[in-house]
Image (spheres, helix red, strand yellow):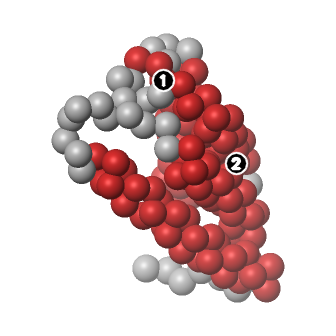
Amino acid sequence: MADRTSTRSGSVGSVVVNALLLWGINIWPGWRVVPFLTTDMTRVLYLINASLIAGIIVNMVFVLVRNRAVMALGNLVVLGIGLAAVIRMWEVFPFDFGNSWSGWPVLVRVFLVLGIVGSIIGAVVEVVNLFRGLAGSRPRTR
């Protein structure tokens, strides 16, 4: 029972965090206050917003439905939109670090690659979870 409560509270926490990020990026203080972001950020923002909104919706569903297949499908949706956002961020690269350390662009690209690889690995895991959930197998207890 405690595990179900903790996963539900984790879903509620994710909804709150995603909603706060959505507010902070778009309303106050807004992404424009970040000095190294360029106006090209508007070319990526719609995917970042879509990912945050998908995370809110999926986690709201998770509060009500604790089904392995449904959760895997929801996670796949969020991972897919997030992956699209990171790939778009790579393409647009809305960063300008000015005269600061010359390694920043490389470091940011490394983190973007890590995000892409992590999303792909996460998607593979969720596909396996989806098939297990559809097959009716139970998760292993720890």
| Residue drawn 31% across the image and 34% down it | 97
**Residue at 56% across / 44% down in the picture?**
92
Alpha-carbon neighbours of circle 2 within 10 Å: few (<14), some, or many (≥20)? many
Task: Tell me which numbered mark, 2 or 1, is placed earlier along the sequence.
Answer: 1
Q: Foreground: 86 or 97? A: 97
- Residue extending farthest top: 28
Please state the horizontal and vertical placement of residue 63, each as a whole percent of the image: 66, 47
Q: Is any atom of residue 129 visible in this view?
A: no
Amino acid, disc 2: Val
Q: Quadrant of residue 87?
A: bottom right
Q: CA distance from mark 2 to mark 1?
A: 24 Å
* Secondary structure state at the residue bearing disc 1: helix
| Residue at image mark 2 | 58
Identified by mark 1, the residue type is Trp
As drawn, the label of residue 102 is none
Residue identifier under label 1: 31
In x, y percent, where is residue 133?
A: 73, 77
Residue 29 seen in the current view = yes
Secondary element at tag 2: helix
On screen, 58 above or below 53? below
